[in-house]
Amino acid sequence: MTAFYAHAGLVGAAFGLVAAGAAVARFARTRRGWLTGHRRLGLGGAGSAWLGSAFAVGMVAGAGGGHLGSPHTWLGLATLVLTLLTPALGQASFRIRGKAALLRTIHRWSGRATLVLMAVTLATGLIAAGIV
Ligand code: HEM
Ligand code: HEM
């Protein structure tokens, strides 16, 4: 049960952090230091999602079940992929100068997709746990 609470708590926190990071990019971009805040919140959220998912893997292993056996777990995996891709695109837009505008556009959409997919994964997790 501890692993379940760790999973739910950490991925819940991940969603809060990623949403706060996206809100900074959307609504506070005129403030000094917005990019640092945006990066830290996004990366903190991504880290929390990975750590929380590690607890889920432990939980499933402890229950003796097969891994990645339900729609929630597939959505979880897709969310984790996006939590790597989105920050990489944001970072790449500062490294690959010639393609900065294109990479930023893709990053913005990938960031929005990360948020939406995370919300759907959270909802299916609540269903998988029998909470709703
Ligand atoms: C999981 C992590 C991240 C998420 C979910 C995320 C999401 C977003 C979103 C949704 C926007 C657009 C906001 C809007 O205008 O509606 C945005 C903008 C931006 N992000 Fe991120 N971001 C993340 C990490 C990063 C990182 C690591 C960097 C690296 C420096 C970065 C750099 C930027 C920049 C420069 C913009 C402004 C792009 C523009 O409008 O030209 N982001 N991000
Ligand atoms: C963004 C949010 C979430 C992510 C990225 C995520 C990720 C994952 C992953 C990757 C697994 C698969 C573990 C394995 O097969 O070894 C899993 C399983 C599971 N997760 Fe989540 N999860 C999220 C939210 C939630 C929430 C909010 C709950 C419930 C409160 C939850 C409950 C469960 C349960 C009960 C399992 C066991 C497998 C099942 O019954 O489908 N998850 N999660």
Image (tube, rainbow, N blue to C red):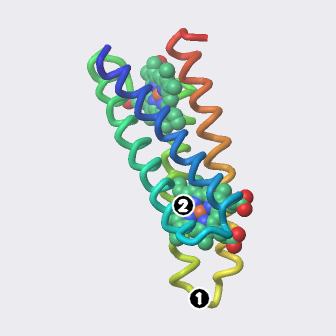
Residue lying furthest bottom in this view? 98
Label 1 lies in ligand 1 vicinity (Cβ under 8 Å):
no
Mark whose residue sits in front, 2 or 1: 2
Pick whichever of labels 2 and 1 is earlier in the sequence: 2
- Residue type for callout 2: His
Above or below — where is 70 with respect to 88? above
Label 2 lies in ligand 1 vicinity (Cβ under 8 Å):
yes
Residue sitting nearer the eye, 9 or 60? 9
Above or below — where is 105 with respect to 43? below
Q: Which residue appears at 50% of the width and 55% of the height? A: 42
- Residue type for callout 1: Arg
Query: What residue is shown with label 1?
Result: 97
Give the quarter of the image for residue 119. Answer: top right
Residue 68 can be seen, yes or no: no
Q: Position of residue 94 (x, y in %)?
A: 54, 81
Q: Which residue appears at 63% of the width and 90% of the height? A: 98
Query: What residue is shown with label 2?
Result: 38
Q: Secondary structure at mark 1?
A: helix
Q: Secondary structure at mark 2?
A: helix
Q: Position of residue 65 (x, y in %)?
A: 35, 18
Residue 52 can be seen, yes or no: yes
Q: Position of residue 7 (x, y in %)?
A: 39, 28
Give the quarter of the image for residue 6. Answer: top left
Residue sitting nearer the eye, 58 or 131? 131
Placement of the C terminus among the 4 image quadrants? top right
Placement of the N terminus among the 4 image quadrants? top left
